[in-house]
Amino acid sequence: MPNIIILMRSEYSVPSPPACGGMKGGCNDYLITPPLTPPRKRGEKDNQTANYIPSPLIKAEGIEKRFAIDDQPVEVLRGIDLTLFAGETVAIVGPSGAGKSTLLHILGLLEQPSRGALSFQGVDVRQFDDYKLAELRLTNIGFVFQFHHLLPEFTAQENVMLPALMRGLSRSEAADRAAYILAQVGLKERLKHKPGELSGGEQQRTALARALINAPQLILADEPTGNLDADASQQLRELLWSICVERQAALIVVTHNTELAAGAARRLTMRAGRLYSLNT
Ligand SMILES: Nc1ncnc2c1ncn2[C@@H]1O[C@H](COP(=O)(O)OP(=O)(O)OP(=O)(O)O)[C@@H](O)[C@H]1O
Ligand SMILES: [Mg+2]
């Protein structure tokens, strides 16, 4: 595996989660990421009181996005409001070019909106610099991209390890955790395969494992079943739902797959840069 540690900036690395304790049951400990919200001040109500109102995991208000092509503005998002609490699942459907991936990139802090407000666990992220955004992404958000973006020279296990290494885990811890998660997605016999030696469905599951390794509270999945046959697609669907339930992770999934969309608690459609509810 090429030396990728040089990509890390130690001053921005986040503390390591607790050790795995081998692979015997201890690995679930690290699935609990510390919350981003600051510690309670004296006199503040705690989570147990009836009056406690949790911050949304993510809250987007009036999000707009425009690009400029040849000095001509291209309006892609035209005022998106979306609030998501921990453990909630949302599916977004809509025609090609409607702006679904653009919205996911903004919610995943990969792109800045042109206008609008965005907060994560009650913290306004608009003023965050690139390093703070990267840290927030690394510790809280798992992205399954429309095209899996696995690195072809790395094995499945190495691909999955990368976010954990960037988070500051040792190589052996990261390798253990990657093996554990790959086993969870049914790939324990494929750890040493490079992406070109995996089927399309296996590549997607590897990408899902990579999105999960840092135990994100928010999973953003862009067409995770695109290019999969019916069986592989059902497998990935079941996997996504069981992981959300097991980890209480929130999920926003963009999909053309009606069965996948039907499994989400909230269904939205995007048309010409605006979101509409499909729930009856
Ligand atoms: N970097 C960019 N510069 C200019 N235009 C862009 C850029 N990124 C996206 N767009 C435009 O924004 C529109 C929405 O793109 P987006 O990828 O969000 O669509 P989508 O709903 O995800 O479509 P699909 O279902 O085909 O994946 C498209 O018309 C696209 O051409
Ligand atoms: Mg897209």
Image: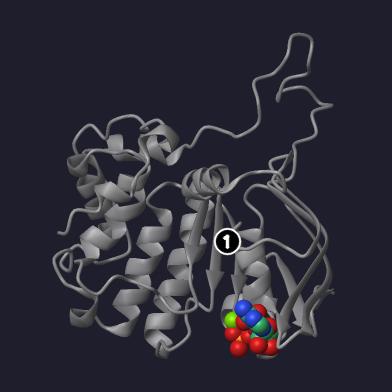
SS assignment at label 1: loop
Kindly indicate the quadrant of the structure image that contains residue 279: bottom right
Residue that appears at 17% across and 69% down: 190
Kindly indicate the quadrant of the structure image that contains residue 74: bottom right
Ligand 1 within 8 Å of the CB at mark 1: no
Q: Is residue 96 above or below residue 176?
A: below
Q: Which quadrant is the N terminus positioned in?
A: bottom left
Depth order, front residue of 126/206: 126
Q: Residue 132 placed where, x, y %?
A: 56, 42
For the image shown, how many numbered marks are present on the structure?
Answer: 1
Q: Residue 4 placed where, x, y %?
A: 25, 53
Identify the amino acid type marked 1: Leu
Q: Is residue 11 above or below residue 200?
A: above
Residue placed under numbered mark 1 in the picture: 110
Q: Residue 3 placed where, x, y %?
A: 19, 53
Residue extending farthest to the top is: 42
Q: Residue 143 placed where, x, y %?
A: 49, 62
Q: Is residue 242 left or right of residue 111?
A: left
Residue 262 visible in the picture? no
Depth order, front residue of 179/173: 173
Report the image quarter containing ligand 2: bottom right
Depth order, front residue of 59/114: 114
Q: Is residue 33 above or below residue 115?
A: above
Residue that appears at 29% across and 70% down: 151
Residue that appears at 80% across and 34% down: 53
